[in-house]
Amino acid sequence: MVANHPPEHLLLFSPSQFPPSTSALGSLSSTMATDIATLSRMLQASLDPQQNKQAEAAIAQEQTKPGFSLSLLQIVASNASPPNTRLSAALYFKNFVKRNWVDEDGNYKLPEDEVVAIKRELIGLMVSVPANLQAQLGEAISAIADSDFWQRWDTLVDDLISRLTPDNTVVNNGVLQVAHSIFKRWRPLFRSDDLFTEINHVLSKFSTPFLQLLENTDTLITNSQGNPETLKRAFTTLDLLLKLFYDLSCQDLPPVFEDHIGVISGLLHKYLVFDNPALRTDDDTESGPQEYVRAGIFEALMLYIQKYEDVFGPQLGQFIETTWGFLMSVGLETKYDILVSKALQFLTAVASTQHAEAFNNEPVLVQVIEKVILPNLTLRESDVELFEDEPIEFIRRDLEGSDNDTRRRAATNFLRQLMSRFEALVTTTSQTYIDAHLQDYAKDPANNWKSKDTAVYLFTAIAAKGTATAGQGVMSVNENVNILDFFQKHIAADLQGQGASPILKVDAIKFLYVFRSQLSPDLWRAAFPLLVNQLGDDNYVIHTYAAIAVERALFMTDSNRQPIIPRADVVNSSKDLLSHLFKLITKNSAPEKIQENEFLMKCVMRVLIFVRDGILPICETVLQNFINIVKVIRHNPSNPRFQYYLFEGIGALVRFGAPKHPQFFEEKLYEPFAACLQAQVEEFSPYIFQLFSALLEANPSGELSEYYRSLFSIIIQGAVWEQRGNVPALARLLSAMVARDAQHIVAQKQLEPILGIFQKLVTSKAHETYSFELIESVVANIPANALQPYFGTILQLMLTRLSNMKTENFQLRFISFYHFVIFKPIYLTVILPDTQKLARPVDRKTAVVSFTKTLGDSQAFVDRYPKGWTLTTQRLIELLVNPPVPTAADDIIPDADVDELGFGVGFTQLNTCRKAPRDPFPEIADVKQWVGQYLKDADSRHSGRIVKIVQERLDDTSKQALAGYLS
C-alpha cells in the first residue's frame, strides 16, 4: 500500500544541490542588486574575443540577482551608453526573457513585481530606441506574448494604440513593429476557438486605428514627394502596415476589411505602381523601400487569392495586368530578385484559379516562356559570381528551398503550375525552346554553355511533377518526356568528361540527384563511381554537389529495402572515401570554415551508416578525425546542421564499434567530451550525454569506470538539468548508470539525489516521460531493501500528480509502470480500464505478463477481489486477440530532415544511437504460449484453483476464450 506520508529522510532538491532559480529570488527592492556600471563593463567585455568567455561567465552570475532584466533595460535606454553596449544589453535581455519568463507549465519564473515592471516599461522603451534595438526588444515582446497575450496581458493592444500618432513615423514604426512581432504568430497556427478569440480581441480594438493610420500614411507619402527622408520613413511605415494587413487577415477575412475592400485594393494597386527616384538604390544588389513594399503587396495579394477569392476576385484584373507589365520590363539586377520572385508567385497563385484559362493557348504561352520564364531561368553574371565567390551560399540557395525567393525557383513553380493545368501544351511549347538552346550549345560548347544550362533547367522544370521528397527526390514525372533518354544524350557526357563547364558538371550531378528515384538500379551502379570521382574535383560546388548525391544514393533502397549500391563496393573504398571527405572538411583550419559545409559531414555520416561494422578496421582513424573536429569547433559552434551530422557520425561509430571495443571508445571520447562539458558548450551537451548513454548501453556489464563515476557526480547535481535540452539525454544517461552501478550507488548513499531528480521531473508535464524512464531503471536495478524506505513516497508523488495534474501521457506511463512493478491501488479505476490504450508492443507484453501472474498467483484476488479477477481475465483476453510482439531489432536507421529539427535550446535526438525499447521479459518469445503454460502451471501449483474459478466466475464467452490456453 502507498504510504500516507513521505519518509522524512527522503532528500528532495536541497539548496546545496540545486542553485536557486529566478523564481526564488524574492521581491525587487527599490535599488536593484545588479550594478548598472559594472554590468555595462561586462557587456562591453563580452564583445571582445579575448575577454568574452570570462565576461559571459560573470554575466551568468549576475542573472541570478534581483532585477537583472530591468538593469539590462536601463542600459538599452541609456543614450550615454555606447551603441554596441546597448545592442549587447538588448540581445541579453531578449535571450534572458526567452529562457526565464515562464516554466514548462506556464508559471512565471521571475518575481511578480519584475514581470509587472517589464510589461509596464517595455513598449514605451521599444518605440523610443533605434531600429536595431527595436528588433531585439520586439523579439522579447513576442516571446512574452507567446505565454501572456492576451489573457495575462490584456492591456497590450490599448497601450499600443495609445502611442500611435498622426505623423510621427519613428514612434509609429516602433508601435507597428511590436504589433507585428505579436500578431505574426498567428500565421502558421491551426484554427481554434482560442485563436479566434484572441484575433477578435485584437480586431475589436486595432482594426479602426489601423485603417486610419493606413489613410494617414498614404496622405503623408503624397505630401512628402520632395522630402526624401520623410518619404523613406513613411514607406517603412507602409511596409509594416502591409505586414500587419497580412497578419490580421491570415486566418479569416476581417469584416472591417471586407467592408473596405475597394478602398484597400485601390491603395494596394497605387503602391504597386508607385515610383519615386528618392526610393531607388544606387547599388544594383541592394533592394530599396519600393521593392520591399511591392513584395509585401504581392504577399497580401496571394493570401487574398488563395483564401478570399470570392470577395477579392472583382479587384484582381488590374493587378494581373500590372504584374504582367512589370515582369516584361523589369531589369536583371539582383535588387529586383525578391520583387520578381513575389510577382511570379502571385501569377502562380492566379494560375491555380479559373483565371488560368487566359494562358491556355499557344501564342500566350510562347510569350510567357520567352518574356517571363526564360529571362528568369537563365544564369546571370551575378549568379556566376556567386558560384565562384560564395559557393556555399550558391549551393544552399539552389538545394534547400531557401531559393523560393530566387527568380529561377519562382519561374519554375509558375511553369509547373501552368503544366498542371495544360500539361501537353506546356510540354510541347517548352520542348521547342529546350531543343533550340541545346542546338545553340552544340554550335560552340566552350562559349555557349549557358544555353545548355538553361535547357537542362527548363527540361527539369517540365519533367518533374509534384513535390520532391527529401528521401527519394522527384516521385512523379511528366509522361510526355523521356528522362532516361535525355540523361543519356545530354547529361552523362558532362558527368564523365573532363572538359565540361563546372556549372554543367553541377547540372549533371543535380540531374541525378533530382531524378534519383526514376533511374534504374543498374544505371545507379554505373553512375555511382562517377559521382565518387567528382568528390576529387577542386571546385567547391562540384565536390559538394557530388557529396550530396553520393549521400542520397547510399540512402536509397529497392523494393526489398536493400541498398541499390552494393555494400561491399563501398566498404572496400570507405578508407579512401572518408579520408578524402575529412580532407575537404578540414582544408581550411579556421573553426568557422571547418563547420561551414554540412553537406560534406552528412556524407561522412551516411558512409558510416551504410558500411556499418565494415568500418571497424579504420574505426580509430575515423574517430580521431571526429575528435579533432570537435576540439576545434567547440570554441565557436556556428552551424547547427554541421554539428548534428558530426555527432550522428560519432553515434554511428559508437553503434557499430562500441559493443566490441567499449573501453577504447570510452578512453578516446571521455577527454574531449569532458572538455566540452567543462567549457559549457551548450550546443554540444545534449549530443554528448546521448553518446555517453549509448556507450554504457553498448557494454551493459561490469561496474562503471572512473570516467563515468566522475561524470555521475556531475549529473546528479541540479545545475546541469536546468538546460532544457539536456533533460532527455540526462535521464537516459542516469538510467544507464543506475543499471550498471546500482550496488556502488547504494553504498555511496547516492540514491537520494537520484530520487530528488525523479521528483523534479515527475512534477513537470514537459518531463514526465523521462521521470518514468529514470524510476523504472531505479526499480529494476536498485536492491529492494535499499529502495523500500522510499517506495511509498515514490508512489505518493505519482498518485498526487495523477490526481492533481493528469495528462493522458502520464496516465499511460503510470499504467505501464504499474504492470512493471505490480501494486494494488487504483487497479479497478485506472489500470484495468486503460491498459488497452497502451500502444508500445513492449508495454502491452508487460501488461499481459502482469495480468497473467496476477490471475495465477494472487490470493487476494481469490479471497477479497472476486470482481477484479473476472475483469482482469476479460482484459487479458482482449490483449491476446492481437498478441503483442515487440519489434525486432531493425538495422534501418531513420533519416532526419534537418529542416524540421529544432536546433537551439531544445533536444535533438541522434538517430544513430537511439535507445532501443527495453523488454523486461526477453525470455518470453511466444506470448500466447507462455500465458497458457503459466496458467496451467499455476493451476497445478494451487490444486486446480484456476480451472475452478474459471468455471465459477466467467461467462460462457470468456470461458471459451480462456479454454484454449488451459487445454
Image (cartoon, rainbow, N blue to C red):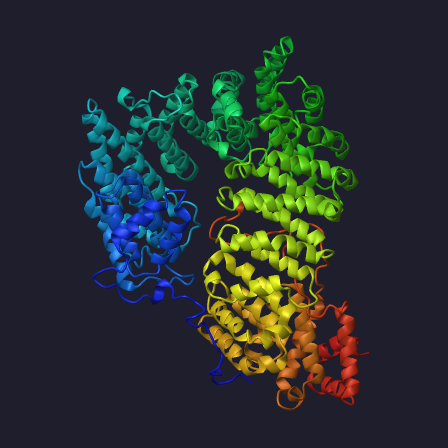
Farthest residue to the right: give it: 967
**x and y percent of residue 959 in the render?**
73, 79
The structure residue drawn at horizontal position 80% and vertical position 86%, both measured from the top left corner, is 940
The quadrant where residue 252 appears: top left
Residue 427 seen anywhere in this rendered image of the structure: no
Q: Quadrant of the N terminus?
A: bottom right
Q: Residue at x 53, y 83 (%)?
A: 2
Residue 729 location (% of width, % of height): 56, 59
Q: Is residue 755 visible?
A: yes
Which percent across, then down, holds residue 499? 66, 17
Q: Is residue 251 left or right of residue 492?
A: left
Query: In the displayed structure, would residue 878 be above or below residue 788?
Result: above
Query: From what the image shows, is residue 942 above or below residue 371?
Result: below
Residue at 57% in and 39% down = 598
435, above or below 534, in the image? above
Residue 298 position within the rendered picture, expressed as x and y whole percent measured from the top left: 38, 31
The foreground one among 741 and 570 is 741
Left or right: 710, with 480 as reference point:
left
- Camera-side residue of 166 and 337: 337
Depth check: give the residue in front, 535 or 307.
535
Q: Residue at x 49, y 34 (%)?
A: 402
Q: Give the quarter of the image for residue 505.
A: top right
